[in-house]
Amino acid sequence: MIRMLAATAALAVLCVSVASAQPPAPPPTFPGQAEFHDLYKELIETNTTVSAGSCTVAASAMAARLKAVGYPDADLQLLIPPGRPKDGNLLAVLHGSDPKAKPILLLAHIDVVEARREDWVRDPFKLVEEGGYFYARGASDDKAMAASFTDAMVRYRKEGFRPRRDIKLALTCGEETPDTFNGAHWLMTTHRAEMEAAFALNEGAGGRLDGDKRVYLGIQAGEKVYQDYTLEVTNPGGHSSRPVRDNAIYHLATGLSKIGLYDFPAHLNEATRLHFERMGPILGGELGGQMKLALAQPTPASAIAEIARDPGYNSMMRTTCVATMVSAGHALNALPQRATANVNCRILPGEAPEAVMATLARVVDDPAITIRMAGEKSPVSPPPPLTREITGPAEAVAKQLWSGVPLVPAMSTGATDGRFLTAGGVPTYGLSGMFGESDGGGVHGLNERIRVRSLYEGREYLYRVVKLYAGGGG
């Protein structure tokens, strides 16, 4: 998962980027914390990379923990796609008292990004606690939530908690390598009834820290659509000693330059407007003032232009397209017969990839350049609504644990498995209760980490908020 809410540059002034010499505050203690640590450790130390790991082993281990506290076999499904024995997914359910109430779905992926031991300070597949942090691949993305959700299901069963609505758990494989296989997409296609829910909770939003101070708690509503496009120019070529202006590389370079200078129109959806409304006072200063101005109808172009100086906020407000790879020519002494480029677009929710492709063609304005979608077309859907049914419990539990910390909605500029569920009729929201620094904690990179305090607090937050969503006590 690419965990991007926005405004990394603007919030850098508020937040530390790495663990400092000052040790973080000691972690709190909540019921069952030692048992949760064991579960989290087991999940972390089960390699689930696509190259050498097995999601099936990890899913089976979590199923065993649920079975050990009394979940019957009928309520546990280990679903393995044909021909992919290592890509197993786990579905579990805690039944509610009202069969007419639509379930809540807890979604987390258990696969992780590749990690090489020689590049890391510590073994990426051993859980290490050091300086107030847990270090490991998947420490945050996304085994923190997968472990927390599984642990919550264990705690509910031990307590004899019976929710009003069913609570479903889906631990899926392949979120990090969707071009190879994606478990959430496969489950929505082949086991749609089991994935049915009023809404789902997923990764995609955490909280932001400034040292030990909690700045805000995020809730994600909607995410941009990921779509690649291939631009290609073909040409008869010829000898490099007889150059002509009709050159495949020149055509492509000119077209890419035009794309680089083009800004798609800005559109503020509900999540972005609420983000500006609540972040403006937090940020203050010129940027905070421009966010307040941007809430006017119609939105002043001057406010958009000022806010767009920050790349993160620019991406929240509009579709973006950027050249990411180029390949051209076949010999050093020959005119190029072919030049291709990949343009990666992050499309606002509700905008069609076909319409974006048409815009690229209009901007390029060169019949020599062909444009086509690369890979499978991403699903398109508007962002789910932020109703009081969603924000109310999230704010109530935040008040219990962190009084005075505001809940700030946002739209993710990255992509999660939520795109498959929301497009399939299950509105999906990012909500973790886990606070981190502005540098992202090494997610997808080296020495991934999460604060010990943040993990334990997030685990307790999710346990309580799911109870409220499901119709139980807080």
Image (cartoon, rainbow, N blue to C red):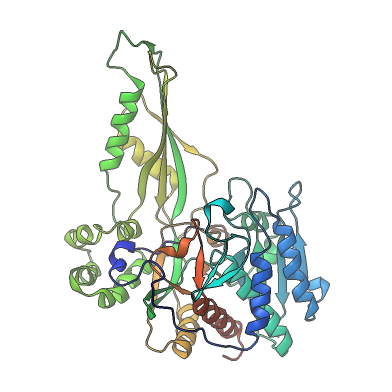
Q: At which x and y percent is residue 94?
A: 71, 78
Rendered position, 112 above or below 157: above
- Tell me the quarter of the image containing the C terminus: bottom right
Between residues 433 and 315, which one lies in front from this camera angle? 433
Rendered position, 453 above or below 16: below
Going by the picture, which residue comes out furthest to the right? 73
Can residue 268 be seen here? The reply is no
Q: At which x and y percent is residue 352?
A: 43, 49
In the displayed structure image, the side of residue 426 where residue 12 appears, left or right: left
Which quadrant holds residue 63? bottom right
* Residue shown at 70% from the left, 64% from the top: 193
In the displayed structure image, the side of residue 404 where residue 391 appears, left or right: right
Which quadrant holds residue 437? bottom left
Which quadrant holds residue 233? top left
* Residue shown at 63% from the left, 53% from the top: 49
Q: At which x and y percent is residue 14?
A: 30, 72
* Residue shown at 46% from the left, 69% from the top: 205
Q: At which x and y percent is residue 18?
A: 39, 67
